[in-house]
Amino acid sequence: MMIIMGMTWKEMMRKRVMLLTLIMTVIFLIAFWFIAKTIGGIHLTSRFDPNSTEVLIDRFMRGSFILMLGFFFGAFVVAFLSIFSSFAVISGEAEQGVMQSLLPRPLPRWKWYLGRWLGYVTLGMLYALILFIAILLITNAQATIPKDPASLIKSFLLFASVVPLLITASMWGSGFFSAVGNGVFMTMLYGAGWLGGMIEKVSSTIRLDAALAQPLNNISGIMSLLMPADALQRKMLAELFSFKDLGGLMSSQNSPLGMFDMGQIPSSTFIMYTVIYTLVLFVWGMRRFGKKDF
């Protein structure tokens, strides 16, 4: 199993998707640095003392805004790597004849599946950790960020939890669809979850009447249940900024965070649903692979 895991790492390093992800990451971080420098350079020092409470709050608000921008785009990069690294793991290799030559060897199929899964997940989470730290460091150089260790650890775990979620769903889909079909399926599934989150944010921002908001909330809830990736992102930001304690500050009309209204923050029960969702797809995908003919 560890051999399969190591083979997955070597394969990923040779793939174009990894090279493309690294190029995207470098471009993103360079652009993010200039954006953070521009936003963080606007202070209230012309009207207030640099050490005053007003300036400190302003720096924290701008730091929060920069972090939200960074993690908004960073989530897409992590999702891109997770989906396109694993969408052809079964069907793609079967189409190329790799699976037929590998499986006759004395290796249980579940060990191959688990080794592949561990390889993709560990590499994806390592990338997520590097990106998470980079976004925090760039923001901290230009503004103020939350520095509570417990909040940072919780927020990283939620940020990185998208990796096993998407890889599990992608490997499950690879057992049912062709390589191209699974790529389209996973892109649409992730897009549906993201759209559900956007509907939730928009409906809570524009303050619709209850009669109009209820159908939108039902639609966004169904989409989040189908793919809870965006909900994990909102929960991550809520943990990072401790929204329960700073709700009044974050919702201020004069705050630059108004456009990033989080909508309904997922509960702990929803996080448990996501864990069960991932486990069910993992077991289902493994069983499907064990019975699949090649």
Image (cartoon, grey):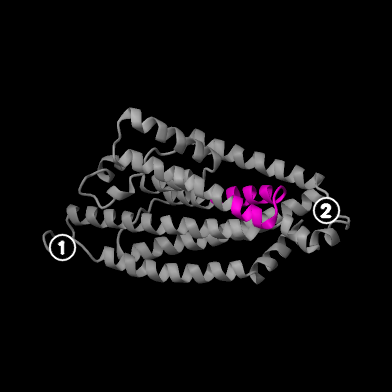
Q: Nearer the viewer, residue 96 or 64?
A: 96
Name the quadrant of the N terminus: bottom right
Determine whether 205 is above or below 10 in the image: above
Question: Where on the picture, by quarter, is residue 55?
Answer: bottom left
Residue in the picture at 41% in, 39% down? 265
Residue 250: horizontal and vertical position, in percent? 28, 45
Q: Is residue 14 visible?
A: yes
Residue in the picture at 37% in, 40% down? 263
Residue 211: horizontal and vertical position, in percent? 34, 28
Range drawn in magenta: 162-185
Q: Which label is found at residue 294?
A: 2
Amino acid type assigned to the residue bearing label 2 in the image = Phe
Determine whether 115 is above or below 35 in the image: above
Q: Residues within 10 Å of mark 1 (few under 14, many from 20)?
A: few
Q: Nearer the viewer, residue 109 or 63?
A: 109
Of the residues under marks 1 and 2, which one precedes in the sequence?
1
- Using residue 35 as the reference point, say whether residue 54 is left or right of it: left
Residue with the most extreme left position: 47
Total number of numbered discs in the rendering:
2
Residue in the picture at 30% in, 49% down? 259
Find the distance from the CA under tag 1 to the CA under tag 2: 68 Å
Q: Which label is found at residue 45?
A: 1
Residue 236: horizontal and vertical position, in percent? 44, 47
Q: Which label is found at residue 178?
A: none
